[in-house]
Amino acid sequence: MDIAQLGQYVVNGMMLGIIYAMVAVGFTLFFGVLDVIKFSHGDVLMLGAFTGYAVYLGLGALGIEASWLQLALVVIASVLAMAGVGALIARFVVLPLRGAPAFNTLLITLMTGMVLRECVRLFFPAGSNPKPFPRLLPDTQWAFDGFALRLDSVLLFAAGCAAIAGVHLLINHTRLGLAIRAVAQDSETARVMGIGFESIVLLTFALGSGLAALAGVMNGLYYNEINFGMGLLLAVIGFSAAIVGGLGSIYGAILGGFLFAALQTLGAVALPFGSAYKDVFAFAVVILIIAIKPTGLIAERSSERV
Amino acid sequence: MSAKIIDFASAATAASDGLVIEGIHTTYDRVDVLTGVSLRVLPGQITCILGANGAGKSTLIRSILGLTPAYRGRIRFNGEDITRLPTHRIVSRGIACIPEGRKVFAKLSVEENLRAGAYLEPSAREIAHRLEHVYAVFPRLAERAGQLAGTMSGGEQAMVSIGRGMMAAPQLLIIDEPSLGLSPLYVKENFAVIERLHSFGSTVLLVEQNVHQTLAIAHRGYVLAQGHVVAEGSARELADNPRVKEAYFG
């Protein structure tokens, strides 16, 4: 393999990594505050991408052509809409099942995801076909020795990093973040501090789902194609990434996301018929890691109970 | 003009009502734990609740805080019915709790724990002021401001928990079994701290098993047994009341 091809693999792996990490951070946030696995997460991502696409079509119909304006509106509308969808799912699907076995929450969110997926397939015009996602980023590229670095990849990667850093800052350095962490550790004592449990849960689900919407739009911008089933594999991968990194830890989710992307890339590069088996390879390694370290690579720091 | 004066006067009586509990019944885990408990916590006083394990003390606290709402009866605070308000709304009325077992947020730093206590205070300046005050009372916490609360000793965690209650600057401070699991030295210190908190202007509702030390600092008290009040009166009266002994040993 030459250096140009390797560079391409690395850039692609980094892009996948940041998208997986964004999905995994959502899983970790939801698990943190409510100890639930929300399996509709990937379909919320998909719905976010379709919302962005619909906004793009709408702007086209209105005659708004400036691509930076289109981009800004696509991102804002998609993130806000999915933040709302995430809060609604939390309010009407997840919270009512509080007190029921966690398995029920897992199942009902799986079903919710299926409903979202089928709604897009049935009600979005020609929803069962892949859609061409517009290229809204500048198509500048730099050539190094046969390897072309595209500006849009750099911008997308930077945007993903900024989004995760933003979530991290919010969690660790704001009053809202303090409330989220307090609820995550001991929701009853948090209530006694005057923290409104339900509103914090809704805000956390809104935050994670908004992040998923951004990941969905980024995915569309990178591959220039979206389809109604795109959330399924992304959810499974994001979930695996969160588990392997250590569910409940944001650093773990980021690590898990990049680890999974690295494994996929490695599988594609090193195995014969690589790209066909890269997912098999990546999942096999993840299963192995979980078997060896069931609490994940970055386990939650356990509390010393006296 | 005169209407204003009357309003002001009635607001003043309402505000001096303190906490009034009227015949509450509460179930916990489907068992009736409280059956018709009535009591009053007068503003400015230390009121204590005594009783053996399983008498319903903790459930009473949970009912006041709305964690396990009473299904019958009424709880009023400064004239307002708070029986079925959600916990964070009850707390916003000026009630704070230093919970049994300290319940510090183990993975938050000491300072974050304290800030969580002042969650409802919007003014950053006021929060800084209260932090300073807590650190003045517990210099040890100032030294360890950045340490995770879960890594501290039991006595230090008790300071965090008390400091967190102080951060709310509540009208009514509920203190649930503060000396449970502490060494005798810390227990003594704890009672001194409670008197000090009271001197800062909080009304205190103290739940304790430690009869003598509790009655030494309390103004009034109630004795709970099997989910209802079996004795009440001033601390002095209770100290001489044989039912107090019965409630523990009978």
Image (cartoon, coloured by chain):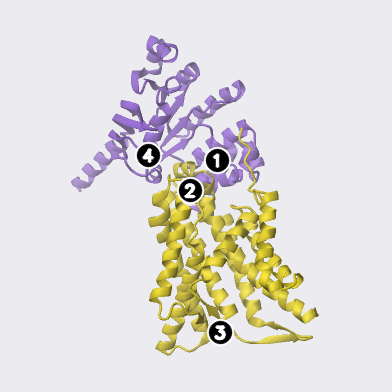
Chain colours: A yellow, B purple
SS at circle 3: loop
- The residues bearing labels 2 and 3 have C-alpha atoms spaced at a distance of 41 Å
Looking at the image, do the residues carrying marks 1 and 2 touch, with CB atoms under 8 Å apart? no
Residue depicted at 37% across the width and 18% down the height: B234
- Which comes before the other along the chain, label 2 or label 3? 2
SS at circle 2: helix
User: Is the residue at mark 1 from the same chain as the one at mark 3?
Assistant: no
User: Is the residue at mark 2 from the same chain as the one at mark 4?
Assistant: no
Comparing marks 1 and 2, which lies closer to the viewer? 2
Residue depicted at 60% across the width and 78% down the height: A222
Q: What is the chain identity of the residue bearing mark 3?
A: A
Which residue corresponds to mark 3? A135
- Residue B119 position, x and y percent, is 48, 48
User: Is the residue at mark 1 from the same chain as the one at mark 2?
Assistant: no
Instruction: State the mark number for residue B119.
Output: none
- The residues bearing labels 1 and 2 have C-alpha atoms spaced at a distance of 43 Å
- The residues bearing labels 3 and 4 have C-alpha atoms spaced at a distance of 54 Å
Looking at the image, do the residues carrying marks 3 and 4 touch, with CB atoms under 8 Å apart? no
**What amino acid is labelled 2 in the image?**
Ala
Q: Would residue B85 be visible to someone looking at this image?
A: yes
- The residues bearing labels 1 and 3 have C-alpha atoms spaced at a distance of 57 Å
Comparing marks 2 and 4, which lies closer to the viewer? 2
Which residue corresponds to mark 4? B66
Residue depicted at 50% across the width and 59% down the height: A39
Query: Residue A160 versus residue B11: which sits nearer the camera?
Result: A160
Query: Residue B150 versus residue B179: which sits nearer the camera?
Result: B150
Which residue corresponds to mark 2? A102
